[in-house]
C-alpha cells in the first residue's frame, strides 16, 4: 500500500536517464515473459481521494472502542498505514475472528476508495500494450482482490489480468514482503522466476521479489519514494511508466 503522507518534489525526469539505465531497462523488459504488478502505486493511487491515514486511524479507533487498545503499541497506534495496524493485530491474534473482522473492515474501506482512485500516468496504455505484444500479466498485492477487480473493471483492464489476481487473504502473515502472492502467480502462470518481472513501489515489494527470485523494477512517483527504494537496494527505478511504455513499444 502506498501512503500519501509524504509529498515531495518529483524524481529527476525520465529524460535524464543514463545510457546504462536505458540498456538495463531494455534487458529487463526483453527477458520478461510474465509481468507481476503491485496494485496500489504502479497501477493507481488507491487512497488518492480516501485517505489511507484516515483509514488507519479509524481501525485504531474501532479497536479502542472494543476495549482492545492494549493490542497495539503507541507506535502502531500512530501508524499511517492500515496494513501496519492489520499486521500488528494479526501477530497477536492470528486466526481469530477479530483479525477476520478487521480485515473485512479494511476491505470495505478499500472498496470505498476504489471509485476515487487516481490512475497512475501511463499505466493503462502500458498494461494494454504489454498484453497486446503477448506478455502475461498478474497482480501481486497486499490489497483485497475484490478491490483490484472492481478498479480494473472500471478501467476496462480486467481481461488483461484475469484470473491472475493474487491479493490479501486472511492468512495475513503472507502479506508482502513474504513472497507468497508472487509464488502463487508464478505457479499459476507456469513461469520461472527469471522469466518474470515485478513492478512495485515499496521496499516490501522489492524484498518479496528478491525472495521469489524475480527481477524488480521500481516505480517512484517522487524523490522520497525513489530514495526509499534505492536505500533498500533497488538498482532499477523509473519515475514515470512512460519510460517503460516506450521501451515495450520499441521491442514489440
Image (cartoon, rainbow, N blue to C red):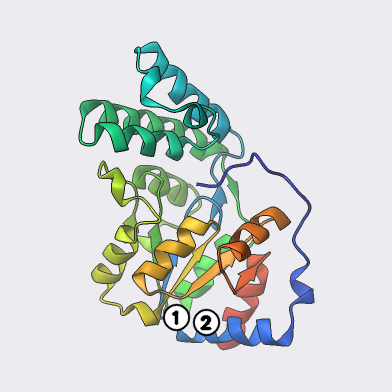
Residue 114 left/right relative to 90: right
Query: Which residue is painted at 47% across and 35% down in the image?
Result: 82
In the image shown, does 171 or 90 lie closer to the viewer? Answer: 90
Q: Secondary structure at mark 2?
A: helix
Is residue 160 something that shows in the picture? no
Q: Which mark is residue 173?
A: none
Please give the count of numbered marks on the rendered protein.
Answer: 2
Residue 181: give x, y in percent of width and height: 32, 58
Q: Is residue 97 above or below residue 187?
A: above
10 Å neighbourhood of mark 1: few (<14), some, or many (≥20)?
many
Residue 212: give x, y in percent of width and height: 35, 69
Residue 160: give x, y in percent of width and height: 41, 64
In the image shown, does 58 or 189 lie closer to the viewer? Answer: 58
Residue 239's quadrant in the figure?
Answer: bottom right
In the image shown, does 169 or 35 lie closer to the viewer? Answer: 169
Between the C-alphas of marks 2 and 1, the distance is 6 Å
Query: Which residue is painted at 37% across and 68% down in the image?
Result: 211
Q: Secondary structure at mark 1?
A: loop
Q: Which residue position holds label 2? A: 28
Do the residues under discs 2 and 1 have CB atoms within 8 angstroms? yes
Query: Which residue is painted at 46% across and 18% down in the image?
Result: 61
Residue 246 left/right relative to 168: right
Residue 112: give x, y in percent of width and height: 47, 31
Is residue 88 something that shows in the picture? yes
Query: Which residue is painted at 54% across and 87% down in the image?
Result: 27
Residue 67's quadrant in the figure?
Answer: top left
Q: Is residue 21 above or below residue 80?
A: below
Q: Which residue position holds label 1? A: 32
10 Å neighbourhood of mark 2: few (<14), some, or many (≥20)?
some
Amino acid at each position: 500500500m502506498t501512503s500519501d503522507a509524504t509529498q515531495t518534489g518529483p524524481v529527476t525526469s525520465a529524460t535524464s536517464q543514463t545510457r546504462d539505465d536505458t540498456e538495463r531497462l531494455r534487458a529487463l523488459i526483453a527477458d520478461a515473459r510474465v509481468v507481476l504488478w503491485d496494485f496500489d502505486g504502479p497501477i493507481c493511487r488507491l487512497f488518492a481521494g480516501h485517505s489511507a491515514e484516515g483509514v488507519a486511524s479509524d481501525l485504531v479507533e474501532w479497536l479502542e472502542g472494543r476495549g482492545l487498545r492494549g493490542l497495539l503499541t503507541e507506535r502502531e497506534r500512530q501508524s499511517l498505514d492500515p496494513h501496519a495496524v492489520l499486521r500488528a493485530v494479526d501477530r497477536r491474534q492470528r486466526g481469530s475472528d477479530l483479525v477476520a473482522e478487521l480485515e473485512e473492515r479494511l476491505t470495505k474501506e478499500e472498496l470505498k476508495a476504489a471509485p476515487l482512485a487516481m490512475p497512475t500516468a501511463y499505466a493503462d496504455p502500458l498494461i494494454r500494450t504489454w498484453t497486446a505484444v503477448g506478455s502475461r500479466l498478474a497482480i501481486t498485492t497486499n490489497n483485497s482482490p475484490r478491490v483490484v477487480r472492481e478498479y480494473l473493471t472500471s478501467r476496462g483492464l480486467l481481461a488483461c489480468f484475469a484470473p491472475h489476481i493474487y491479493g490479501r487473504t486472511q492468512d495475513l502473515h503472507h502479506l508482502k514482503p513474504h513472497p507468497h502472492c508472487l509464488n502463487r502467480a508464478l505457479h499459476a502462470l507456469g513461469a520461472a522466476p527469471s522469466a518474470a518481472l515485478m513492478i512495485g513501489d515499496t521496499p516490501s515489494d522489492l524484498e518479496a521479489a528478491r525472495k521469489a527470485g524475480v527481477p524488480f523494477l521500481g516505480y517512484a512517483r517522487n524523490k522520497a519514494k525513489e530514495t526509499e527504494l534505492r536505500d533498500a537496494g533497488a538498482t532499477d527505478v523509473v519515475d514515470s511508466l512512460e519510460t517503460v511504455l516506450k521501451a515495450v513499444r520499441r521491442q514489440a
